[in-house]
Image: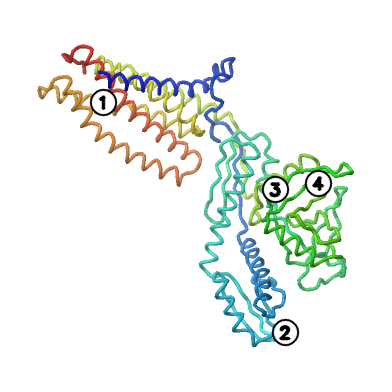
Amino acid sequence: MKAVRWRLAFSLVVFLAALWYALPNLPQVGQGPLARFFPQARINLGLDLKGGMNLTLGVDVEKAIQNTLASSGQDMRERALEDKISLLKPRLNAEGLLEVVLPREDQASSFEDMLRKYYPDLAVQSSSSGNLGRTYVIGLSAAARKQAEDMTLDQVVRTIRNRIDQFGVAEPDIRKQSDNQVQVQLPGLTDPERAIQIVGQTAHLEFHLVRDDVDPTGMMLPEGTALFPYVEKNGTGGNSLVLDSQSLMSGENITNARPQYDQNGQIHVALEFNSRGGSIFERITGDNIGRRMAIVLDGKVYSAPVIQSRISGGKAVITGNFTLAEAQDLAVVLRAGSLPAPVTVLEERTVGPSLGQESIESGILAALVGALAVVIIMPLYYAVSGLIADIMLCFTMTLLMAGMTAFGATLTLPGIAGIVLTIGMAVDANVLIYERIREELKLGLSPTEAVEAGFSRASISITDSNLTTIIAAAILYQFGTGPIRGFAVTLSLGIVASMFTAIFVSRAVFEFWIQRNGGKRISV
């Protein structure tokens, strides 16, 4: 008897804790004067219920691969210096492949050994001899290219998620799709234009040397240079600067970015690099004293100061005619990480909340009708045991709502269907147990023995069937889109809650009932 009471006490504590988490989702509680006594967490509504924005982004994976090759070229030149191999400055050709010129052909074997040893992901596409020496055209191997494509998409998803989290959108759904695309769902978004700017801004920061010896208005630009638009401090554009095509370094080593005011009251974005970025920045400023270095963000020059001395400490600033909001948004995207490749908005779709309200009302009505039917039918068929099943159903729904609140789950339209399905599955477990108890009673077992056998034997079937359903729900969650994942979440939580109430709580109630009446009778 003591063990049964402990189980009932534990069940009561679980119920009260679940009720504490679930009640704030009721407007009368969550928005009333009692709200301060309850958790602040609430069940989030999905895009199909709350409205919001759906974006489909295209990722320029080729640009990311070219950036990888350019970075490898810079590292290759430094390693060649360490190995005393003469190497002209690597550059990307018109096909986006890395061109490396070796002035001394007698060092070809040493250079190729270096490639095999330190750059296994690179593959020599072709090599030829010329006036300058031996020229190598280098690209990524097939396996490395596939890995780079996957890593680029993964990084895009991760970076966009970090930005959206700082933007403050609850429960965004961001996932990869085929054809180098990413889907972004932003429930409840109120400022779509700003969201598109933050999500779609590549925030690819680079530092280039300015070629003041080249006329930007000339018809032909020297090889290895390119024309970049210059954003004037007064907010106007129109001017351009000629820069070296290959960047000195990128912003991948940024650890912090924040808006600041200078001594003139103008706002700028202050950058801080990690140790590796700080050492690179110190080296390139030391090697180019007296030259102008352009700070390029997403292909636009924001400032081009003259390098007066070697800059140590790993700090830099981006100046421009920023408003405070623009500087804050820029700091957000830089702090969250630059996208490894440019993205373009292929599709923009805004979902209104009116459909969501109708869906919520229809879903609640369906759940109430289903629950009411169960509540009426169960006592009619199973008498007092049916009433216990109804109580367990209420317990299960409370646990489900509390679980969704505690885990920050998102309720979608398919999720409401999952709740309705949980109502049927919760009662189904009780039906299996009750029918098994009836069979044991017909075989002549006592009520105590029948309850013991009924719960023990039916629990095996309940566990097996629910386990397979949970596996299916896990697959839906992994590979489904936002609304389908909502269905998987509610279904999984509902199954766990129904198993707990049907196998653990219901059994404790039955055993307490039998012990109170001396084990003489039971109504099933």
Q: Which residue is mark 4?
A: 268
**Camera-nearest residue between 66 and 106:** 106
The earlier-in-sequence mark between 3 and 4 is: 3
- SS assignment at label 4: strand
Rendered image quadrant of residue 429: top left
User: Disc 2 to disc 4, how far (Cα)?
Assistant: 45 Å
Neighbour tally class for label 1: few under 14, some 14-19, many 20 plus, Cα within 10 Å: some
Q: Is residue 524 visible?
A: yes
In the image, what residue type sits under mark 2? Leu
Of the two numbered discs 2 and 3 in the rendering, the one whose residue sits closer to the viewer: 3
Left or right of 182 in this view: 337: right
Q: Position of residue 214 (x, y in %)?
A: 86, 69
The earlier-in-sequence mark between 2 and 3 is: 2
Q: Which residue is mark 1?
A: 431
In the image, what residue type sits under mark 1? Val
Q: Residue furthest top?
A: 517
Residue 256's tag is: 3
Q: Position of residue 90 (x, y in %)?
A: 69, 73
Q: What residue do we see at 66% from left, 67% from top?
A: 70
Q: Residue furthest right?
A: 264
- SS assignment at label 3: strand
